[in-house]
Image (cartoon, rainbow, N blue to C red):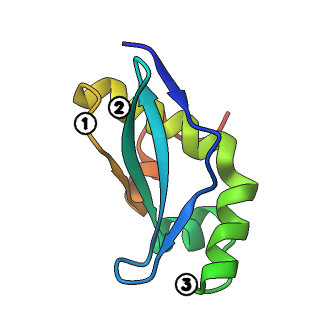
Amino acid sequence: MHITFADEAPVFDGDDLAIHFAALIDGEPVVCSITAEALEDHFGAKSPREDDLLDAYTRGTARIRAVCAEVLDDNGGQPAVLRSGLFRVAGMEPD
């Protein structure tokens, strides 16, 4: 399975308080998300407001994508929601 990430801008979801972004699994798009809580806890988002979450996503894109790729590899390429606790899991913390 080849995992890459689309160059599309991430999308704020105010109903779920999350940021959605696209991964490409063997070239096919899969929508993934990171919660506002994860962005606040691990990437410095000051609030669940759209601008704050998008700024935090931008700052943390490399790590978010790395963790997302691990999750996608583990779940067979199914859509993934990255929650705060996932960033504390052994092997997924930053180097």
The reply to whether discs 2 and 1 touch (Cβ–Cβ < 8 Å) is yes
- Name the image quarter holding residue 95: top right
Count neighbours of disc 3 (C-alpha within 10 A) and say few if under 14, some if 14 to 19, many if 20 or more.
some
Q: Amino acid at mark 1?
A: Gln
Q: Is residue 38 above or below residue 4?
A: below
Task: Give the alpha-carbon distance from disc 2 to disc 3, as whole Å.
Answer: 25 Å
Q: Earlier in the sequence, mark 2 or mark 1?
A: 2
The reply to whether discs 2 and 3 touch (Cβ–Cβ < 8 Å) is no
Q: Amino acid at mark 3?
A: Pro
Q: Is residue 48 above or below residue 19?
A: below
Task: Give the alpha-carbon distance from disc 1 to disc 3, as whole Å.
Answer: 26 Å
Q: Which mark is residue 78?
A: 1
Residue pointed to by mark 3: 48
Residue pointed to by mark 2: 72
Q: Residue at x 39, y 58 (%)?
A: 85
Quadrant (top left, top right, bottom left, bottom right) of the N terminus: top left
Q: Position of residue 78 (x, y in %)?
A: 25, 36
Q: Earlier in the sequence, mark 2 or mark 3?
A: 3
Q: Nearer the viewer, residue 84 or 6?
A: 6
Count neighbours of disc 1 (C-alpha within 10 A) and say few if under 14, some if 14 to 19, many if 20 or more.
some
